Amino acid sequence: MATFDKNKISPQILEDLGLTRTQSRVYFELLKFGASYPATLAQNSKLTRTTCYRVLESLNQKGLILKIKKNKKFFYEATNPKNIKIVLKNKEEKIKNQLENLTNILPCLTDLFFSSESLHNIEYYEGIDKYEHILGDALKFPGEKIYTFINIKFLLVVLKGKERMMSKYINQRIGAEIKNYSIIPKNQAEFARKWSSQEYNNQQSRTFMGHYRYIDDEKIDYSIYMRIYHDRVALFDFESPKQTGIIIINQRLADMLKEIFKVVWKMSKPI
């Protein structure tokens, strides 16, 4: 158990116990110097009188100070500091009740979060290790389709050493019967054909394999990986210094990009 020197105790100790900064300053003054009038407390605590009166009222409600009338004037004195323990127990009980309430309403809050049309529903990730989470997010929606713009060779270079993670994801996606449609650079058509034949080597795999097409336009920048699925658009910048990614949850945006993808898909050529 930690020990304290009473000469070194400061209002900060009271803040650490849950009082506000102004409550700590006023209560500390009363503990250290005894009963006092509001004007004196305000001056010593360097607070305005209005603020001091408000703080005194809050401390009185907590049971930490007493309000005493003498000669038609009110002054205040601290109660036994053991009452702080009662305050903390009350706060603990309040937090416990709040957690129980949160547990009960969390499913509703989650539904609101995922059903919102706001573009403010953006999840931000940093670091190549977070790419696994962006991949895995699509597994929440079995039986659906994923549409991607991707540079396969570049992706495999960046993810070197994470082949097991990629293989696990592909197996999970196939198990969830999620089809993947990817548009790739023209110069990777042959590579994609060989790679996909290795990764999808049984009947179920071939049914839900990655479908690849390429387009002739060499001006498209594939270094930013885009995935469109369900009500989401995921972007991952592999070339940024911090390798950042985001997931935007917005049904209208996802629907619009799916339609754009389908138009480009019709213009593209099979590998």
Image (cartoon, rainbow, N blue to C red):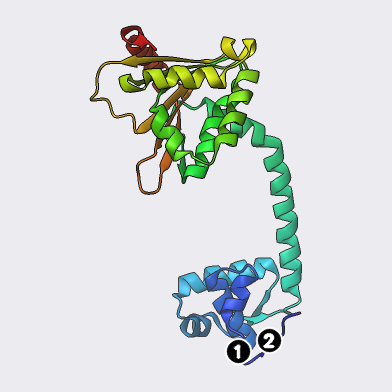
**Residue 95 on image: x %, y %:** 70, 53
**Could you tell me which residue is drawn at 60 percent across and 15 percent down?**
205
Left or right side of 89 for 125:
left
Give the number of the disc on residue 4: 2
Which quarter shows the C terminus?
Answer: top left
**Could you tell me which residue is drawn at 62 percent across and 24 percent down?**
171
Give the number of the disc on residue 143: none
Residue 16, by quadrant, is bottom right
Residue at disc 1, secondary structure: loop
Residue at disc 2, secondary structure: loop
**Residue 201 on image: x %, y %:** 60, 16
- Viewer-proximal residue among 220 and 190: 190
191 in relation to 99, above or below: above
Left or right side of 39 for 77:
right
- Viewer-proximal residue among 157 and 169: 157
Residue at image mark 1: 8
**Residue 153 on image: x %, y %:** 40, 30
Q: Marks 1 and 2, Cα distance to the nearest angstrom?
A: 7 Å
Q: Amino acid at mark 2?
A: Phe
246 in relation to 252, above or below: below
Q: Residues within 10 Å of mark 1 (few under 14, many from 20)?
A: few
